[in-house]
Image: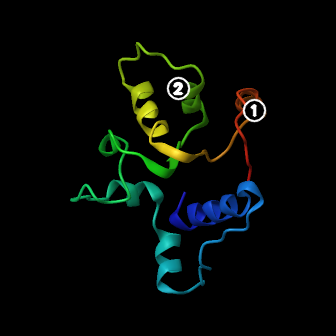
Amino acid sequence: MNLCDIYNTINGVLGGVNGCDIRLPKMIKGKKFSIFAEKTSVADLVNSLKLFEDESNIRTIHGAKGTEYQSVLLYISKEHELNNLINPNINDSKDDCRIYYVALSRAKDFMCISVPSLSADMKARLVGLNLKVTEI
C-alpha cells in the first residue's frame, strides 16, 4: 500500500469511530504531499524512519517497550498473521507473539489493527472475540 491509501483508510476509520466525524485535513491532488503520498509505499516510509529521541510519538514495536500511548495503530500486512493474536504460541522461537504483545499492550484507550483485507472466516473469528470490525 502507498501512503495515500493508508491516509485514506485512516481517514475513513476516524470518521466511523463511535459515530464521530473526525477527519484528517483534505489531501489536494497534485500538491507536494499528494504526489509524495502516491509514490511512497508505507513499507519504504517505515523502514526509512530514523528515530534519535525517545520523546518521539512514533516508535517501532521494539522501541516502544515500557511506554504507553492514548492510541496505537498496528498495521499487519497479511491476514494469517492475525492468528498470532487469536491463538498465540508462547513457545514460538521467532518471537512473533511477544512482538504483537508489545504492540497491543501500548494502547491506553484505543487500539486499531489495520489489515489490507479480511476473509469472512477471519472476520467471524474476530467478532466472536468481541472485537469491533470496521471495513472500509
Residue 58 against residue 33 in the figure, above or below: above
Position of 44 with respect to 115 (left or right) is: left
* Quadrant of image for the C terminus: bottom right
Residue 131 percent coordinates (x, y): 70, 36
Q: Residue 127 shows which numbered tag?
A: 1
> Label 2 amino acid?
Asn
Residue 135 percent coordinates (x, y): 74, 50
Name the residue located 67 percent from the left edge and 68 percent from the top edge.
22
Q: Residues within 10 Å of mark 1 (few under 14, many from 20)?
A: few
Position of 71 with respect to 50 (left or right) is: right
Residue 107 percent coordinates (x, y): 49, 44
Q: Which residue is mark 2?
A: 84
For the residues labelled 2 and 1, the Cα–Cα distance comes to 16 Å
Name the residue located 35 percent from the left edge and 52 percent from the top edge.
59
**Residue sitting farthest toward the bottom:** 31
Res 47 quadrant in image = bottom left
Residue 81 against residue 15 in the figure, above or below: above
